[in-house]
Image (cartoon, grey):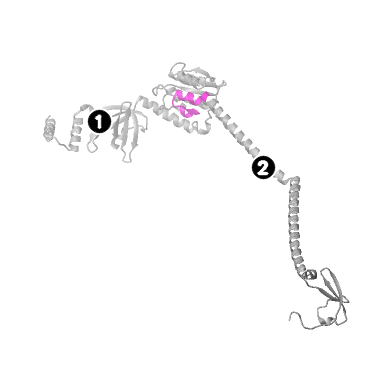
Amino acid sequence: MDLLHSLTEYWLNLLKNNVYTVAQVNSYIKGMFNQDFLLRKLTVKGEVSNCKYHSSGHIYFTLKDPSGTLNCVMFRGNRNGLKFQMTEGQQVQVTGSCDVYVKGGSYQLYATSIEPDGTGQLYEKYEQLKKKLEELGMFSPEYKQAIPKYIRTLGVVTAPTGAAVRDIISITRRRNPYVQIILYPAIVQGVDAPASIVRGLQVLASTDVDVIIVGRGGGSIEDLWAFNDESVAQAIFDCPIPIISAVGHETDTTIADYVADLRAPTPSAAAELAVYEYQRFMSDIEDYRNILYGQLDATLSLYKHELKVRQGMLRAYSPWARIRDRRMRQADYVDTLNLLWKQQLLKKKNMLDIRIEKMKGLSPLDKLKSGFSYVEDENGNNIKSVSQTAPGKDIKVKVTDGTIYAKTISTDTHSMFS
């Protein structure tokens, strides 16, 4: 009482100041925790999460349940009493004391002993079986069968009543009313459940179903335990029909989920994965038809274009085309030759005209017309000089309109141009 009285006096004095340090507040809360006898030793159960084995030897983890979380630590000195390796998801019972970590301003459970809870023991069995089957290769992807895209018959192994079967039937009818459902009414909970599920898989495997959905609605780990049974896992693995597992809710995972060819988070999702939507199927067919017609039109257009090209090439390389080409060239050569001939004739004509004009300039007749005459001796030689004749010689004087016959009377050496 004296210690409690002293602490009370101490805190009353501090309260008078109205302003406190962080350490003072945390120390005050720590003192309140220490005075509460319930918090000095209590046992808390919950699910292990965020479990870390520190190199110092301490174990840090969190206990959680649907309503909250509690930070926990087990120091190295208390680990001698821990008989198992803690892992995520285990259900455990932790005994210890709650205290405040002054420096961090947080409280946590300081564990002195940890024991598996009832469901924790089931979790241990689950982990052991999971490890065993995984080592046997029953989870390997190479053993998974493909789920057919289009099915006609759907097999279902589940309870005949409940939300799971109603959801599967409802969604199947909505997505494709032409799919036939064959239900095997299995026991999905209790000691008789594993054998019932195995029998259901065997019966449906002997029918012509295209795919099988095996599962049930949500529940506790005990409720779902039939789907963690080794015989059920073996039956799923051995089934020649593709199997979709749909056990519990999205957060629930069973051994059946690992062995099945495909895992669905819920029975509703399993129906959506198994049954192709009919309207979408018809829409896809329409899309494929349009694509096919489009490709066909494109192919025909390509072939038509190629045909025209080949026809053009055939015409270009045809003998008749070459003959026509030669004829056209011959016609061009004839036209060119005629043009050149005409040009040459015109050129020659022009030259002839020029020479005619020159000849006219040199013609005696033109000179005669101009008043000149042409004088020849009696032998027809042109007399150009007085020395070519003599008095008494006969001469001929040619004029424009005839010839004058005369004799030379006399000559005179004086030129008329001098």
At 26% across and 27% down in the image, what residue appears? 42
Instruction: Examine the rendered structure and indicate whether residue 104 appears above or below residue 67.
Output: below
Circle on res. 97: 1
Q: Where is residue 305, by image quadrant?
A: top right
Q: Rounded to the nearest whole Å, what is the CA distance between mark 1 and mark 2?
A: 94 Å
Instruction: Return the residue found at the far front.
Output: 409
Q: Which residues are magenta?
A: 257-279
Q: Which residue is more in the foreground, 358 or 380?
A: 380
Which residue matches tag 2?
Answer: 309
Locate residue 366 relative to residue 223 in the image: left or right: right
Q: Quadrant of the N terminus?
A: top left
At 51% across and 27% down in the image, what residue appears? 237
Q: Secondary structure at mark 2?
A: helix
Locate residue 153 relative to residue 246 in the image: left or right: right
Amino acid under disc 2: Val
Mark 2 closeness class: few <14, some 14–19, many ≥20 residues within 10 Å = few
Amino acid under disc 1: Ser
At 60% across and 31% down in the image, what residue appears? 293
Q: Where is residue 368, by image quadrant?
A: bottom right
Judge whether residue 229 can be spotted in this image.
no
Mark 1 closeness class: few <14, some 14–19, many ≥20 residues within 10 Å = many
394 falls in the magenta region: no
Q: Position of residue 175 (x, y in %)?
A: 50, 22
> Which is nearer the N-term, disc 1 or disc 2?
1
Locate residue 326 relative to residue 275 in the image: left or right: right
276 falls in the magenta region: yes
Judge whether residue 111 can be spotted in this image.
yes
Q: Position of residue 398 (x, y in %)?
A: 83, 72
